[in-house]
Image (cartoon, rainbow, N blue to C red):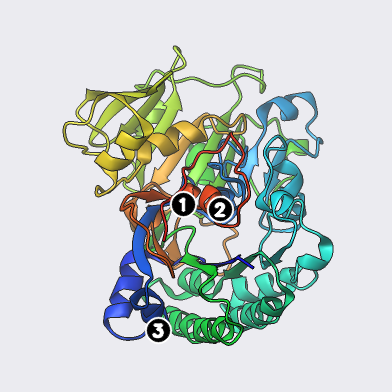
Amino acid sequence: MKKVIFLLLDGARKDTVEKYLDLGYLPNLNELISNGGSISSATSVFPSTTGPAYTPFLMGLFPGNANLPGIRWFDKVNFSKNKLSLMAHRSYVGIEGLLLNDDIKKSNKTIFEIVKNSRSIFNEITRGLQKEFDLTRISKGYYKIKSHFSGSSSIDLTSSKKLLSSLDKKAEFIFCCYLGVDSNSHIHGHDSKEVLDSYKSFDFELGKVIQKLKDNNELEDSLLIVTSDHGHSNTNCHIELVDVLKKQGFKVFSYPLVFSKLIKNIDAAVMVSGNSMAHLYFRKEKDWSKRKTFNGTEKIIEDLVRNPGIDILIFINEKSQIIIRSIRGMAMLEDKESGLEYTPLVNDPFDYKNLKGLLTYEEILDKTFDTDYPDALTQIHQLFNSNRCGDLVISSNEGFDLRDNFEIPEHKSSHGSLKKEHMLVPLIMNKKVTEDKIRTVDLFPTILRFLNYKSPIKTDGKELDIN
């Protein structure tokens, strides 16, 4: 029986994995690659953060197209109708994480709704999965809280224990999350000894998985995937966007102070994801239901773009065109039937070289893959497809993040931005893959084809050629 074992090494950077492979710290991962496998790079999604960056793997959709634009979001239309509506705003960091499966786009199936004989370990997107097959359904809250505050390796040891036991259950698809690299990166920095220990621990447990598949004579018929949802970069300075807007006279709504909406007439909302990206929402005149547009030279835009911690600003202008600003320049992005039209207006905000005109999605990936902002144009466009997307979207500069208040413990490393350090992730398989420029969203149709299931028509990825 064919099976897919998907190991999500949450928060792993491609260059870090390559470095530790070269140093001999990851012998089992090296064996997987050397014995007929492959190692590639793949581009994640914007925001490059846990949760939204899982939708490519589990739904075949970019997060904007799954209507999951961040780990925190604000719905202006629902808020305008009823401030107390359960659908007015969300933070998946906490009890509202239980609502994630109800929030994602219902017209597209998850992989668990297609491959019924599946298992899930420490994963929140489980719609369609039988309760008994969510192997950490009861314990994930406890372990994730523990991991968040202490960076404990116990969550990864539990992942391995559940994974090894599930290999005997003849499951066709197993999605197993290893969260130690991510949590230890936040607490200690992505290049810390604690994070290295998490990589080594993962590799040791991977050896047990490989051996178990060999003992069961299943390795040849199995597709073993090791990848990540995002990378990390160390944080030296925290910008509190709530305070930035308050200084400009706005009455701001943000988490965790959700009851502020009842005691003051708020006119702005800040929703941060991964701490390196944020959605900003503004009341237009006295109407929350309308999108706030900007002309690109307004004071708030100019003030934000000059902030040293802010790298990229993205917003809609009066003509419904996407405008991209940075200290380096300004460009316009428009959706066309055959792709995206990219027009630098004043230099190029990404410092792309000779990139302009009508571009297909594959051309965008090809021409930007090796830049500091891989696949940024596609990722910006998909995010604005969500009706929960902010009026202003911010991607931070390296070394900075966008949240300070109520962030306990302090983040020493962050993610979520359009920068390559967050967007490029490793992709290791026990099979050869011919493509050299890959999106994480390509794995969904590839997995279904390997298992002989038909992929839904409406997905954002393509099947990879593996052998």
Residue that appears at 49% across and 34% down: 382
Q: Secondary structure at mark 1?
A: helix
| Residue 425 in the figure: left or right of residue 52 | left
Q: Nearer the viewer, residue 261 or 30?
A: 30
Judging by the rendered image, the residue that carries numbered circle 1 is 440
The span from disc 1 to disc 2 (Cα, nearest Å) is: 7 Å
Looking at the image, is mark 1 or mark 3 earlier in the sequence? 3
- x and y percentages locating residue 180 in the rendered image: 54, 75
Residue 246 shows in this picture: no
- The amino acid sitting under disc 2 is Phe
Which residue is identified by label 2?
Answer: 57
Q: Residue at x 31, y 67 (%)?
A: 15
Query: Which circle marks residue 260 in the picture?
Result: none
Horizontal and vertical percent position of residue 373:
31, 45
Q: Earlier in the sequence, mark 2 or mark 3?
A: 2
- Examine the rendered structure and indicate whether residue 36 appears above or below residue 279: below
Q: Nearer the viewer, residue 381 or 301?
A: 381
The residue beneath circle 3 is 193
Left or right, 434 with respect to 447, comes to left
- Asked if disc 1 and disc 2 are in contact, CB closer than 8 Å, the reply is yes
Kind of residue sitting beneath label 3: Lys
Q: Quadrant of the N terminus?
A: bottom right
Q: Secondary structure at mark 3?
A: helix
Local crowd at mark 2 within 10 Å, few (<14), some, or many (≥20)?
A: many
Residue 118 in sight here: yes
Tag nearer the camera, 2 or 3: 2
Please say if 399 is above or below 46: below
Q: Please, which residue is most extreme toward the left here?
A: 354
